Structure formats: structure tokens, C-alpha cells
Image (cartoon, rainbow, N blue to C red):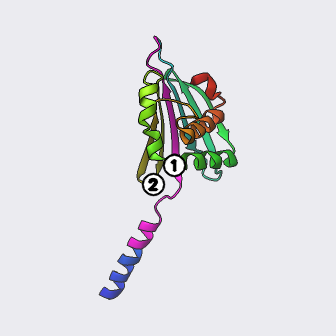
Amino acid sequence: MSNRVLYLLILFFTISCTSQKSEIEYIEFEHECGMLKVSDKIFIRILPSSKKQRKERIVELTYHGKMFMRKPIPEGEYQKLIDAILQIKKEESENIESLIIFNDSGSNEIIYRKGSMMKKNFSFVLDKKYNSEFYNAAKLITKAAELNIEDIR
């Protein structure tokens, strides 16, 4: 009897460990330029839909702390965005050269959560020349929110 209980406990533990979420739960992009008199804080969040039967993502755009837009995006566009975010290298998002050259250009952050892990990528500049992977991911995120990345650089 005790062997069966031990076996069931081991089985339950194994199943609970392997059933952790392996997909990205949400993505956030924040842009802010502190050098302006009025901050241009832009916050974009991509969340799963609250409808369980549909596997779609919702894009929320917040500007100056007020909800500006909320719309669904296609799964194909979301997958391209995920691929771009996973391409960002840690060394590139902490590029010291961009700190020296662009120290007054604002701050940009891409955050995503996958299971119990939260990953943050940061850049002081949105420029393809200095951090191309971060720029490409930010461009796809802003496109999903119907913004032109050139307008917020």
C-alpha cells in the first residue's frame, strides 16, 4: 500500500513540474523620454484573450497613463513578435556604447513572462545600428499597436 502511495506522489510531482507554462504569458513595451517637458510615456501590453475557447492576443496601448486603444492581433503576427523578442541578446541590450552616445534619448524596456520567469530587456536608444534585435522587436510591438516606431524615437 505504501509503495502505491509513494508511486502516486512521485507521479503527481512529476506531472505538476512538467505542466508549467512553456509559452510567453504577456509582453510589455515601455518607452519614455525624460528630457521633454511633458513626458511622452508610451506603454504597450500584449495579453492573452480572456475568452478560453479563442487563442487570440489583445494589444493595449496606454499613453500618458490613459488607455488609448485595445484590439486583437492575429496569431501569426504574435508569433513573429515572440521570435523577435527571443532573438534579443543580453549583451546587446546592455550596450555601453549606446549609453555614452545616446544618454539623453530616453528609455525603452521590453518585458515578458514565461512561467515563473520574467525577462527584461532594456535600451537607451531605439536605433537599428546599435541594437538591431531590440529595435526589430520594438518595431513589431509598436506596429501591433498601430504606431510607427520612427515617430517615438
Q: Position of residue 56 (x, y in %)?
A: 64, 47
Q: Earlier in the sequence, mark 2 or mark 1?
A: 1
How many numbered circles does the render carry?
2
Depth check: give the residue in front, 152 or 126.
126
Q: Is residue 28 above or below residue 51?
A: above
Label 2 crowd bin: few (<14), some (14–19), many (20+), radius 10 Å: few
- Looking at numbered disc 2 in the image, what kind of residue is underneath it? Gly
Residues at circles 2 and 1 in contact by the CB criterion of under 8 Å: yes
Q: Quadrant of residue 17?
A: bottom left
The x, y position of residue 40, in whole percent, is 51, 19
Residue type (three-letter) at the residue carrying disc 1: Glu
Residue 20 colored in magenta in the image:
yes
Point out the stretch of residues depicted in magenta.
13-37
Question: Which corner quadrant holds the C terminus?
Answer: top right
Which of the 4 quarters of the picture holds residue 147? top right
Of residue 153 and residue 69, the one placed in the foreground of this image is 153
Res 58 visible = yes
Q: Is residue 28 above or below residue 103?
A: below
Residue displayed at 59% across by 46% down: 84
Q: Position of residue 43 (x, y in %)?
A: 52, 29
Quote the CA–CA distance across marks 2 and 1: 7 Å
Q: Which mark is residue 25?
A: 1
Q: Which residue is mark 2?
A: 115
